[in-house]
């Protein structure tokens, strides 16, 4: 049982030689140096209790982890069964961090073996570096034990893995490369994972863009794999993030576009609605399940690609819970990850941050190119309660006073962190954590100092998955810019019609005054645009031959991205990609080949043209 | 006191009560209120600000000339000793919709620096919307919120940008003009009373009148006022007074030490931070002050601790403070450690007692910390045998 949760190796260090005498000595040495490592990935715990899986930092940790997201109330224990090769004394190591070391964080938890807690408390070391903590020795009395994580605060304590070792002086590695190798070895992960199948189209990313791309391609008869790194579809529009869909679908140059987006649309519950059901997770999954040509792979993070020259041949994904790996072969791939993960892994040309005015000629571009991006939101909401409730003081969070606090019972889009002071990909965890420090710090202030208004108000929901706005933009054959948008240029390959303003957020001035360099609240200026079309050439990679893209990571400048990034628009990009993939398959050509040689046919599909009379 | 509290709350809600209660009850309350003004200071408590409006003995009037055709009276309330308390205006302004003009009667109150505080309505007066509907309770509350916001879409807008001419409806492309979404705009206005909101907001935040109020207050400036501003709960007063008692080199006027110390130890992190940052290094030169600052550090919130450590980085700590910095150094987080070791390393000479404390910390588990401590000690070339031996032990542990 429980093959997925525990992993054991027995590594003999010695080499046997043919001499009998030497053999005897070496056997002894082998006994002495034999090491039993029992490695437990927390995300693979059988019963996660109230802990949640977080994979948002996979690209920097090469793993997911468990987190106790209880909004200040300790969550239920996570438990699992662990098998040991033999009983006896084992050294225990716990891999964790203090996520809010200001100066000590609140994420305290304990580890228990068969109900007996190890005395040491983890998660409040004062260091925000992920590392192994020595938890001392434990007597393992049975070859099968129950291991549990006990959350002590409900404030986002987190644990990546637990290691039991009988090697007396062994210290597990902390350096990423060594740790990854160690982890892979103990997880028995090989370079040849099981094949999930060969697909006409492999869509990576199950947000609105990816989901629409998959549906569109499948309805054109393509065999599709849709790979999503969370248990739900919809990305920023899922109940995990709760951003509403924006951008119009009724102003299309090609009215056929937007039909799939309409199917995905669950109405407009606004941003951060406290009712999860409003976002229609189950409905989105059932739409996909209704498509016979789509194989859906949830909870799968794609972290590796295989390619021949500039053609992607396969991608490899790891399950964020079980850690099993699967390989997906494909003819075409679509990067709908938002972060441009697939393109990045494949070596696709990309940009991140702002271009300079000199480079793009855009009046709204920055004077100098820089790393500034729009931030990430962790939305939240409170609801009225029957009686007054309390919320602890949060000295580790951002601090507020009567002079400055946010007098709101729920979040909207303005709650946003990461304006160039954090990297939205490699520091996604820090950004989320900064958002949490703002939310909990402000809420604690309201609950403890504004009782007349907030005593009978209770946190109903706080997102632990960040709603990311911006990261990489993969470069295509055309880079959409401000002039294209404002002059309403209609290129022959104009496809999706976009309507959203150029909506480039920046830190709110007052927030900057009080939290300079630590801003968490945004402002914007909407630059209105007339409906304009996005050229098809923005939807495939310039230098990776079989790579499409849809969503916020398409080929635009930072300024143009300010308008294309909204989800209904992104969904329609997915629709176009699905159509284009069908043309590419039909003529055994590349996405660029579709533009160069078969554009009238693609446009015909967008128009919904029927065939001319056939002979 | 209890009586005055109850009455003050009632007074605060008088605006809303007009429609709810009989005129008789309102009259009674008004009488009680007036009686109370005569005998007592009255606290007006609102969710946003605690505004203490003391008894008014005198009122001074100022005429403001907005333009050739518009002049009005600004009033300053003074206490019995002639000290200024707050400004107010009994406003009458016409609000015109579709050719029909209606008078709006409303009283506005500002603090002495022209920060809008609150409004109330003269007896018997109400506010109405374009269709003559009376304001509902939630409309009065919304107006309170709208007027309470110093930043508003109204700030950058002209009336004609906001509304379709001759109506009280939001213009169709108001969102394009403001760069805000229609949803945001709707939150910032009262449906059917957009013009009223716009007009009143501009009265509350009119630059001319605010400047006049500041000018008047400045004319009353004296030590007593500065002390009372520094010790008030109004952070605007505190910032304003700090600007006047601390010069640009950080030198503090005589007799204001206690006021500044109180702000540094006060509940408001932001005024505390400003006070610390503004005050020059000389202020913390004495050992006594350093000790005081360290005591403050111990009971401060994390962000203020960081401000204090940054401050200490520019002064020369005495032996006691050096020891205190060293004694809990390994319990610090990375940022605190970096700042503390930075302060110690910067000294010309590190007291032997401090070196001893640091040498003890060499046995700590955090390798990053111990290696920094070792480097710092090495730099000062310790002569004490105990320190030297602890450093040797550390070194040999490392090489193992």
Image (spheres, rainbow, N blue to C red):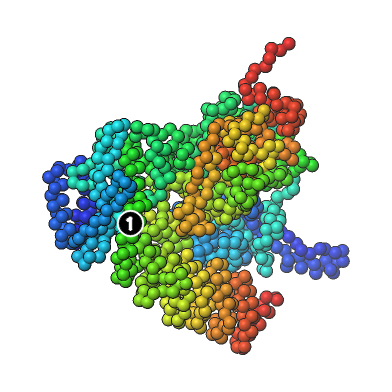
Judge by depth and name the residue closer to the eye, A285 or A217.
A217
Q: Is residue A69 left or right of residue B374?
A: left
Q: Residue A357's spot in the image, x, y percent?
A: 63, 46
Q: Residue at x 62, y 21 (%)?
A: A608
Q: Residue A154's spot in the image, x, y percent?
A: 47, 55
The residue identified by callout 1 is B212
Q: Quadrant of residue A554?
A: top right
Tally the marks: 1
Image quadrant for the C terminus of chain A? top right
Furthest residue toward top: A615
In the picture shown, does residue A263 fall above or below B7? above
Q: Chain of mark 1?
A: B
Judge by depth and name the residue closer to the eye, B236 or B361.
B236
Q: Residue at x 41, y 46 (%)?
A: B155
Q: Is residue A2 left or right of residue A283?
A: right
Furthest residue toward right: A19
Q: Residues within 10 Å of mark 1 (few under 14, many from 20)?
A: some
Q: Residue at x 53, y 46 (%)?
A: A505
Furthest residue toward front: B68
Say whether residue A316 is visible.
no
Q: Residue A145's spot in the image, x, y percent?
A: 57, 57
Mark 1 secondary-structure assignment: helix
Say whether residue B10 is visible.
yes
Q: Is residue B109 left or right of residue A7?
A: left
Judge by depth and name the residue closer to the eye, A67 or B1.
B1
Q: Residue A40's spot in the image, x, y percent?
A: 62, 55
Q: Residue at x 47, y 62 (%)?
A: A396
Q: Quadrant of residue A536?
A: top right
Judge by depth and name the residue closer to the eye, A614 or A504.
A504
């Amino acid at each position: 049982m429980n093959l997925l949760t525990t992993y054991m190796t027995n590594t003999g260090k010695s080499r046997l030689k043919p001499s009998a005498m030497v053999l005897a000595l070496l056997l002894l040495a082998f006994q002495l140096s034999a090491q039993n490592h029992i490695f437990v990935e927390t995300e693979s715990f059988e019963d996660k209790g109230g802990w949640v899986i977080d994979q948002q930092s996979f690209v920097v940790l090469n793993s997911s982890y468990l987190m106790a997201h209880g909004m200040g109330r300790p969550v239920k224990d996570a438990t699992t069964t662990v098998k040991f090769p033999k009983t006896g004394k084992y050294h225990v190591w716990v891999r964790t961090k203090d996520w809010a070391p200001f100066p000590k964080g609140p994420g305290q938890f304990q580890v228990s073996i068969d109900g007996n807690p190890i005395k040491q408390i983890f998660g409040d070391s004062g260091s925000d570096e992920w590392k192994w903590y020595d938890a001392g020795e434990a007597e393992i009395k049975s070859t099968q034990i129950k291991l549990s994580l006990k959350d002590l605060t409900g404030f986002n304590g987190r644990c990546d893995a637990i290691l039991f070792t009988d090697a007396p002086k062994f210290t597990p590695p902390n350096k990423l490369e060594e740790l990854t190798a160690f982890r892979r070895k103990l997880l028995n992960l090989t370079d040849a994972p099981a094949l999930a199948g060969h697909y006409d189209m492999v869509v990576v990313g199950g947000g609105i863009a990816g989901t629409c791309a998959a549906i569109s391609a499948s309805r054109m008869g393509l065999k599709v794999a849709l790979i999503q790194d969370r248990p739900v579809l919809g990305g920023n529009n899922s109940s995990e993030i709760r951003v509403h869909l924006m951008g119009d679908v009724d102003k299309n140059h090609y009215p056929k576009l937007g039909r799939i987006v309409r199917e995905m649309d669950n109405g407009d519950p606004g941003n951060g609605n406290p009712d999860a059901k409003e976002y229609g997770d189950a409905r989105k999954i059932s739409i996909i399940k209704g498509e016979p040509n789509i194989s859906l792979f949830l909870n799968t993070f794609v972290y590796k690609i295989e390619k021949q020259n500039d053609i992607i041949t396969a991608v490899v994904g790891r399950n964020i819970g079980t850690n099993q790996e699967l390989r997906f072969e494909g003819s075409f791939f679509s990067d709908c990850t938002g972060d441009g993960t697939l393109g990045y892994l494949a070596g696709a040309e990309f940009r991140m941050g702002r271009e300079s005015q000199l480079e793009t000629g855009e009046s709204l571009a920055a004077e100098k190119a820089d790393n500034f991006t729009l931030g990430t939101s962790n939305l939240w909401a409170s609801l009225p309660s029957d009686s007054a409730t309390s919320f602890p003081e949060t000295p580790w969070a951002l601090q507020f006073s009567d002079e400055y606090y946010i007098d709101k019972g729920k979040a909207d889009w303005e709650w946003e962190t990461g304006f160039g002071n954090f990297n939205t990909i490699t520091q996604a965890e820090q950004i989320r954590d900064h958002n949490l420090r703002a939310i909990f710090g402000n809420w604690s202030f309201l609950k403890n100092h504004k009782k007349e208004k907030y005593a009978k108000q209770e946190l109903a929901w706080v997102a632990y998955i960040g709603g990311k706005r911006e990261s990489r933009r993969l470069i295509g054959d055309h880079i959409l810019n401000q002039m294209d948008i404002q002059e309403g240029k209609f290129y022959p390959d104009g496809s999706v019609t976009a309507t959203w303003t150029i909506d480039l957020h920046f830190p709110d001035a007052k927030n900057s005054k009080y939290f300079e360099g630590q801003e968490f609240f945004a402002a914007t200026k909407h630059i209105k645009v007339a409906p304009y079309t996005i050229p098809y050439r923005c939807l495939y990679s310039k230098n990776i031959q079989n790579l499409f893209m849809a969503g916020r990571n398409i080929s635009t400048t930072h300024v143009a991205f300010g308008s294309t990034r909204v989800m209904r628009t992104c969904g329609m990009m997915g629709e176009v990609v699905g159509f284009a993939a069908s043309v590419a398959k039909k003529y055994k050509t590349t996405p660029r080949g579709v533009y160069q040689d078969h554009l009238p046919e693609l446009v015909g599909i967008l128009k919904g043209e029927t065939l001319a009379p056939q002979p | 006191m209890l009586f005055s509290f109850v009455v003050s709350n009632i007074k605060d809600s008088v605006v809303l009560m007009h429609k709810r209660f009989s005129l008789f009850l309102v009259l009674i309350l008004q009488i009680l209120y007036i009686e109370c003004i005569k005998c007592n200071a009255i606290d007006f408590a609102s969710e946003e600000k605690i505004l203490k409006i003391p008894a008014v003995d005198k009122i001074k009037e100022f005429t403001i000339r907005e333009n050739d055709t518009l002049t009005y009276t600004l009033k300053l309330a003074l206490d019995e000793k002639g000290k200024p308390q707050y400004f107010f205006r009994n406003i009458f302004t016409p609000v015109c919709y579709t050719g029909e003009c209606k008078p709006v009667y409303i009283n506005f109150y500002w603090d002495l620096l022209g920060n809008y505080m609150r409004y109330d309505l003269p007896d018997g007066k109400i506010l109405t919307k374009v269709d003559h509907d009376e304001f509902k309770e939630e409309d009065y509350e919304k107006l309170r919120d709208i007027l309470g916001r110093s930043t508003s879409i109204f700030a950058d807008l002209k009336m004609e940008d906001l509304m379709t001419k001759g109506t009280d409806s939001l213009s169709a492309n108001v969102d394009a003009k403001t760069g805000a979404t229609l949803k945001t705009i709707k939150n910032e206005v009262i449906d059917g009373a957009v013009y009223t909101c716009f007009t009143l907001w501009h009265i509350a935040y009119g630059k001319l009148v605010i400047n006049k109020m500041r000018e008047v207050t400045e004319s009353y400036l004296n030590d007593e006022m500065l002390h009372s501003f520094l010790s008030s709960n109004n952070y605007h007063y505190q910032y304003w007074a700090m600007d006047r008692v601390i010069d640009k080199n950080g030198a503090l006027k005589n007799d204001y030490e206690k006021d500044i110390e109180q702000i540094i130890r006060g509940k408001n992190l932001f005024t505390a931070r400003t006070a610390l940052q503004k005050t020059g290094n000389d202020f913390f030169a004495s050992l006594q002050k350093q000790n005081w600052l360290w005591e403050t550090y111990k009971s401060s919130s994390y962000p203020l601790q960081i401000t204090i450590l940054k401050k200490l980085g520019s002064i020369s700590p005495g032996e006691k403070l050096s020891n205190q910095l060293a004694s809990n150094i390994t319990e610090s987080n990375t940022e605190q450690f970096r700042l503390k070791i930075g302060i110690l390393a910067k000294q010309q000479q590190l007291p032997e007692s401090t070196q001893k404390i640091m040498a003890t910390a060499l046995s700590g588990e955090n390798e990053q910390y111990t290696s920094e401590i070792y480097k710092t000690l090495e730099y000062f070339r310790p002569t004490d045998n105990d320190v030297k031996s602890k450093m040797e032990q550390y070194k040999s542990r490392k090489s193992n």
